[in-house]
Amino acid sequence: MLGLWRRREAAASAAAALWKCRTVYTAKECRAVVLPRFGGPGVLELRSSVPVPDLKPQEVLVRAHAVSINPLDLRVRSGYGRSIFEPLLPLILGRDVSGEVIATGASVSSLSIGQEVFGALHPTAVRGTYADYAILLEDELSVKPSSVSHVEASAVPFAALTAWRALKCTARISKGHRLLVLGGGGAVGLAAIQLAVAVGCSVSTLCGSKSIERVMSVGAEEAIDYRTEDVQSTIRGQFDAVLDTIGMPETERIGVNILKKGGHYMTLQGEAASFADKYGLAFGLPAATAILLKKKLQYKYSHGIEYSWTYMRADAEGLDEIGRLLEAGKMKIPVEKTFPIAEVRQAHEAKEKRLIHGKVVLELY
Ligand SMILES: NC(=O)c1ccc[n+]([C@@H]2O[C@H](COP(=O)([O-])OP(=O)(O)OC[C@H]3O[C@@H](n4cnc5c(N)ncnc54)[C@H](OP(=O)(O)O)[C@@H]3O)[C@@H](O)[C@H]2O)c1
């Protein structure tokens, strides 16, 4: 409620500022990174005259300044989710964006032309953000704090909303809870640590040696290098929630065994999309659901815990809170390197070959 009020107030002042010089810009075409077929980074094409569709009532046209690269972009490019995306090719990659509102649909009330915004699209959106003009729903955007650059803001929403969904909507963490993040050094892991610290949880994490300083600097109380330390004997006590960003059998074993009764084990590596890709939507999704239900029952019975696959979802309240944490300096995903959009192939290649440890952002200028 407070978030909506803040958005409306910001929209009103931006509208007033624009009153004298308002120009409604209707872009019909723009540059965009198009995926014509699945494959390596070489399949990505920066095209110059990609149509910009007319806005639906709840949509917002954003002039993108920066878009970050998420692992999902690389996976979709190589064919992950083909059961959904293949019939829709060519598509535009990209989930995260930070930029400026250029036009708003008829029923948009909380954002106005000229405002600087950041946000993220749903994982299955077909027209992604790697474009001069991105289209998002009003609820997928929030006002960008002025203290944060577009590059910094674009690194945050998809990862932080993934963490938000798991911690706030599934595990319902609160002050005094103990959280274990398996794979805390990545964007989702760092966001999870910061969201949990902000509500007063204590956080332990497993990560690579290169990430230890980073996870401690954002508030983790304990960081364990999973490549060199004996994890089982190092972590002490029991936890209320485990967020597993890695989702391997070994991390799952650690996670479920360290939880209190009634605790939540949440993995980011749910198998719905991979089953649908393998067996088709009609058989794959029910098969994945059956596996999920079996695991839920199995862990409920054997360990007394709640087991879930967790996915990113747009959440206006979550995004507003993430914006407030950004503004207060309590949420930050460090950006390791930026590339101009024209070098999108090099950027994907660098991420794929793990040449860059951390977030990569594409700039549009
Ligand atoms: N289910 C969903 O809706 C959802 C949403 C978002 C993400 N995900 C998935 O969750 C996982 C994490 O996402 P993310 O955005 O946090 O990914 P990320 O920022 O790329 O981090 C991934 C992990 O890999 C390690 N890492 C990163 N760069 C590396 C490099 N150059 N060399 C070696 N290790 C490197 C990181 O830390 P360490 O070095 O400390 O291990 C981190 O644990 C991905 O598999 C992603 O597909 C799922």
Image (cartoon, rainbow, N blue to C red):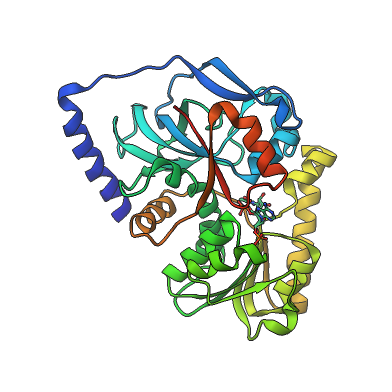
344 lies above or below 317? above
**On the rendered image, what quadrant is the C terminus found in?**
top left
Q: Is residue 88 left or right of residue 4?
A: right
Given residues 62 and 109, the one toward you in this image is 62
Residue at figure coordinates x 62%, y 37% from the top left: 347
Residue at 63%, 77% in the rendered image: 262
Q: Residue at x 40, y 38 (%)?
A: 138
Q: Position of residue 8 (x, y in %)?
A: 26, 43
State the image coordinates of residue 139 (x, y, percent, origin top left). Answer: 42, 42
Residue at image position (30%, 46%) is 146
**Residue situated in front as seen by the camera: 201 or 330:** 330
Q: Is residue 14 above or below residue 160?
A: above
Q: Farthest residue to the right: give it.
A: 279
Q: Residue 11: which quarter of the image?
A: top left
Q: Is residue 225 left or right of residue 286?
A: left
User: Could you tell me if residue 237 is visible in this image?
Assistant: yes
